[in-house]
Image: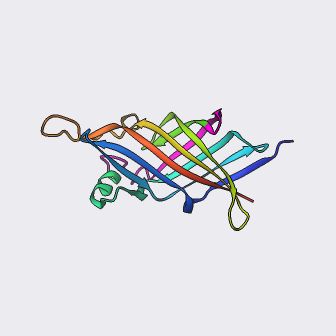
Amino acid sequence: MSTVTQWGVDPLHSEVQFKVKHLVISTVTGAFNSFSGGAVSKDGSLEGAEVHFTIDVNSIDTNQSQRDEHLRAGDFFDTTNHPQITFKSTSFTKVKGDLYKLVGDLTIKGVTKSVEVDAEYGGTAKDAWGNTKIGFEVTGKINRKEFGLTYNAVTETGGLALGEDIKLIANIQLAEVA
């Protein structure tokens, strides 16, 4: 009989960020400040864990309120109709050492695509109250246009204002659920 361990995202010790090129010359960083998720592992092994994650798109924060409002609008995320980004893993496999490959279905703005990201295991520790925690840094890249985020302004020289590739960076701490 296998043992199952439930893990929940610790939002106080986790962060979800993204980076996008602006005018192809600089990078703008943003974050989502409200999210939840977790994982289910079996027999004390992280390999093969089932991972799920939900982001409240209205919590987008780029340190510019006017830009954030535009990102929430129909040109981009259309949060009135699509208030969440979701992820559900299809595989979680160890590559080598502390490196894992996380594959799953990412849904943004009603479009679901399979994505593959890297997950680096940071370790396991007990907090001051005896709770078991594990940490991962998840990194990857997606093409925003594949998810219906097609808005782009053209500069006066004919260049595009926004890059198509979005870098994803999530530092996630999971707490064992009793």
Where residue 18 appears, as percent x and y from the top left, is 41, 47
Q: Name the image quarter holding residue 131.
A: bottom right
Q: Residue at x 57, y 37 (%)?
A: 104
Where residue 130 appears, as percent x and y from the top left, is 73, 64
Residue farthest toward the right in the current orientation of the protein: 1
Q: Residue at x 68, y 63 (%)?
A: 127
Where residue 20 appears, as percent x and y from the top left, is 34, 43
Asked if residue 112 lies left or right of residue 81, the reply is: right
Would residue 26 be counted in the magenta stretch? no
Tell me the quarter of the image containing the C terminus: bottom right
Asked if residue 95 lies left or right of residue 132, the reply is: left
Q: Residue at x 68, y 41 (%)?
A: 49
Asked if residue 159 lies left or right of residue 67, the reply is: left
Where residue 175 appears, as percent x and y from the top left, is 66, 57
Residue nearest the viewer, comparing 125 with 177? 125
Q: How many marks?
A: 0
User: Magenta part of the protein: which range?
Assistant: 74-99
Asked if residue 170 lies left or right of residue 9, the reply is: left
* Residue 32 sits above or below residue 113 on the image: below
Q: Residue at x 64, y 32 (%)?
A: 96
Would residue 75 be counted in the magenta stretch? yes
Tell me the quarter of the image containing the N terminus: top right
Residue nearest the viewer, comparing 103 with 134? 134
Residue farthest toward the front in the current orientation of the protein: 97
Residue farthest toward the left in the current orientation of the protein: 156
